[in-house]
Structure formats: C-alpha cells, structure tokens
Amino acid sequence: MVRGRFAPSPSGRMHLGNIFAALLAWLDVRSAGGVMVLRIEDLDVDRCTRDYAEQIIDDLHWLGLDWDEGGLQDEYCQSRRTAHYAAAFDTLAGRGMVYPCFCTRAERLAASAPHREDGSVVYGGRCRGLDEQQQQQLLASGRRPAWRVITPDEEWTVQDGNLGAYTLNLAQEQGDYILRRSDGVYAYQLAVVVDDALMGVDHVVRGRDLLSSAPCQAWLHRELGYRPPQFFHVPLLLAGDGKRLSKRERALDMAALRERYTPEELVGILAGWAGLLPEPQTVRPADLIAGFGWDRVPGEDIVAVLPE
Ligand code: GLU
C-alpha cells in the first residue's frame, strides 16, 4: 500500500509552487488507492505558527485535497517529535558519525569549498579535524556548536520516479550537513528522514528544489536501518522571464489565489501545467485520479503564467 505525505512548513501562506506539488502528491496516493499523511513541519519555532498551520489545512480543504492521517495532533507535528530525532541522533553519535561544528557563518562562507548550483556553500569540514581536547576547550569557552554528520566520499544515486536517475557525491557535493543546530533544534535533514521512516511513508512527492537532498536522505535512511522512500520530484514553476517564482510574491499566495479563482479553476490550471489536461478546464482533484500517471508529468520546469 502506497503511503504518501503532505509536509508543509507553516511559516507562511502556501503559494502556487506548494499547491502544485501538493496536488501531484495527492494524485500519486489516490491513484494508487494509498494512504495520505499530513505532517506539520514546524521545526523552526521562530517562524512557524499554529495560525499558519490552520490556514494551510483550510487551503488544502478548499482545493479539495484530503488526507487520512495526521494534522495538528502532537504526533504529526515536528516540534513535538524531538524524542524521535534525539534517538536517531544518538544512534549516529554512538557510531562516531557526528561532530560538533563551532564555525560562525563568516567562517563557513570563507572556507574554500565549492559552491553548488543552487548557490549554497558546501561545508569544507573545518571542524571535522578538531581533536577531543580542542572540542572540550571550545565547549568550555561557552560556544554552542551545531552538530554535523560525516558524509562518505561516495556517489549516491536515487532513481527519481519523475526525473530518473540522480547522482551526487555526498562528501564533495553535499558536505557534512547539520543534524542539530546550535540552538539545539534538530535539523530538517534528520527530522524528515526519521519522520518518513516512522510514519511508513514510501512515496515522497515534492518540488525539484529538494532533489539534491534526496541522496543525502536516502543515505541517512540506510545508516539508520530504514528503507529509503521512492522519490518523485516535480518541476519548479517559473515566471514568464524564466526565473523561479518568488515565494514572497503576494499575488501567488493562497490568499490572493482564492480571491481570484474558484477551486475548480485553480486545480484546472495546475493540472494543465502538470500535463494532465489537454486544455484548461474546471475540474476537481478527484476528476483527475483516473487519468493520472507520472509519464504525463513533465520533467522540465514550467513557465507558469496565470490566466486572467
Ligand atoms: N517542509 C518542506 C517544505 O515545505 C518539505 C520537505 C519535504 O518535502 O521533504 O518545503
């Protein structure tokens, strides 16, 4: 039985890209007669709010997307699942796979590490070489470290269900990534792996912006003794000028979209971009289930110009 998930971060209103991925995640599960889980990714307590989470739930309902498990209950909210992340962290730490990193932001950026295609910096491993005594000294001086996992110098390939094979060298192209932040909060990369595993999620459908995380997550699943899920990354939506749609653009968030369109109009527009309708049409998500297939969904990013 397929188990998929919505995993929104309630740090703002959903925007066009979020609902495009959500529609495809829902169709992937419903067309397989599977189970949909809603997990609230509110790790970042400074930015995430209950109001936003409630708003997201209302927006999903408005679109006609439903789920079978999860929501605002504690066991589906990442901010309440710290014990699970701590257990996984301790497993890795017990195997000597994590180390404290005292680098400041400036030090990280100054490290002569390659920059990835998305502009992010690959951590050069500066604090990996600290010995026990140096670590103790830094801790004693009151500096609070983040904790990184030691990535192997190995290529990892995921077979993406929409985009095909995707390979990354974990050490060289991702670098040792953070599992626990210096404020003590467990990081997205650890939480998402633990949650997908413990919630039995075996289909992960999300935006292509997270593709480069997939090999890291698949590797972490294996290290923790779990089976990695099947990933499906969906194209990004681009503005008319070919640039990625801005999350900050108000006209593309659900508040504005709900004023401008009916749910059936909006779902029809998304379905057209997803290759599921030959021409724009008003539809409910349920009308798309029978015709859904990943072979219809494009791999290239989509110029998403909203009709008047
Ligand atoms: N919470 C993430 C987001 O809203 C999604 C994480 C994931 O799908 O793995 O962008």
Image (cartoon, rainbow, N blue to C red):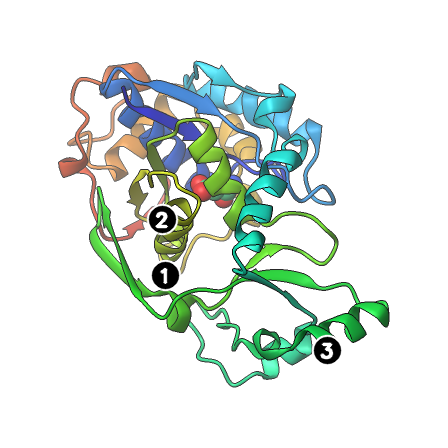
Q: In which quarter of the image is the N terminus?
A: top left
Q: At 49% across and 64% down in the image, what residue appears?
A: 150
Residue 283 is at least partly visible in this image: no
Q: At 60% across and 47% down in the image, what residue appears?
A: 90
Picture coordinates of residue 191, whole percent (x, y): 54, 42
Query: Residue 295 sits in which quadrant?
Result: top left
Q: Name the residue under label 3.
A: 134
Q: Mark 1 points at which residue?
A: 241
The mark that comes first in sequence, 2 or 3, is 3
Residue type at numbered disc 3: Gln
Q: At 72% across and 58% down in the image, what residue appears?
A: 182
Q: Which of marks 2 and 3 is in front?
A: 3
Q: How far separated are the C-alphas under marks 2 and 1?
A: 34 Å
Residue type at numbered disc 2: Ala
- SS at mark 3 in the image: helix
Q: How far separated are the C-alphas under marks 2 and 3?
A: 32 Å
**Rendered view: 277 above or below 170:** above
The mark that comes first in sequence, 1 or 3, is 3
Q: Mark 2 points at which residue?
A: 218
Residue type at numbered disc 1: Asp
How many residues crowd around disc 2 within 10 Å: few (fewer than 14), some, or many (20 or more)? many
